[in-house]
Amino acid sequence: MSDCIFCKIANGEIPVEFVYRDDDVFVIRDINPQGPTHFLVIPTQHIASSAEVTDPSVWSKVVGRAVEVARQMALDKDGYRMVVNTGDQGGQTVPHLHLHLLSGRHFGWPPG
Ligand code: 5GP
Ligand code: ZN
């Protein structure tokens, strides 16, 4: 989508440093981190939100990559949180599916 910020990052219109990238998924650092480590795991294909996912392999790619990045960066040593915000009440602000991978501090439950 031409006016989507994550599509612009995916197609190189907005230059960023990729933490990981393959044909299906990329990982970047969140511009406004909510913890010492805050990555976004994003499918290259424009999918507006988790509610729009029809192909379950999207989840294996996104969640699988998040777990792999967490493992490679040793985030699993102290633990991490994965979050997918969906829609207005879910707190989604960028309408292109993404998974937050957060680590480096204690994240309470229930979330604030
Ligand atoms: P949401 O609220 O939709 O779940 O999360 C969107 C996230 O994208 C926010 O945490 C926000 O800080 C991040 N974000 C928004 N614009 C940009 C950007 O241009 N670059 C990066 N790296 N992160 C962004
Ligand atoms: Zn998009």
Image (spheres, rainbow, N blue to C red):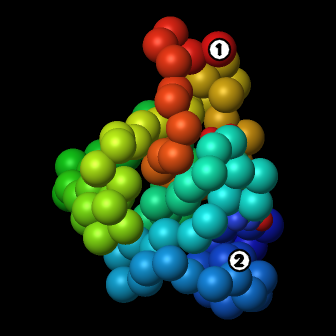
The residue positioned 27% from the left and 56% from the top of the image is: 67
Report the residue marked by disc 1: 112
**Number of other residues with Cα within 10 Å of mark 1, as a class: few under 14, some 14 to 19, many 20 or more:** few
**Real-space Cα distance between discs 1 and 2?**
31 Å
Whether the residues at callouts 1 and 2 have beta carbons within 8 Å, the answer is no
For badge 1, the amino acid type reads Gly
* Disc on the earlier residue, 1 or 2: 2
How packed mark 2 is, by other alpha carbons closer than 10 Å (few <14, some 14-19, many 20 or more), is some
Q: Which mark is residue 19?
A: none
| Residue 90 in the image, given as x and y percentages of width and height | 60, 23
Give residue 51's quadrant in the image.
top left
- Three-letter amino acid code of the residue under disc 2: Lys
Element at label 1: loop
Q: Disc 2 designates what residue? A: 8
- How many marks on residues? 2
Which residue is found at the position 37% from the left and 67% from the top?
A: 73
Task: State the residue at coordinates (55%, 82%).
Answer: 18
Label 1 CB, ligand 1: below 8 Å?
no
SS of the residue under disc 2? helix
Position above or below: 45 against 107 = below
**Figure check: 64 above or below 95:** below
Q: Which quadrant of the figure contains the N terminus?
A: bottom right
**Disc 1 vs disc 2: which is toward the camera?**
1
- Report x, y in % for residue 93: 73, 40
Residues 103 and 92: in front is 103
User: Is 100 displayed left or right of 78 in the figure?
Assistant: right
Instruction: Please state which of residues 63 and 108 is positioned toward the viewer in this rendering.
Output: 108
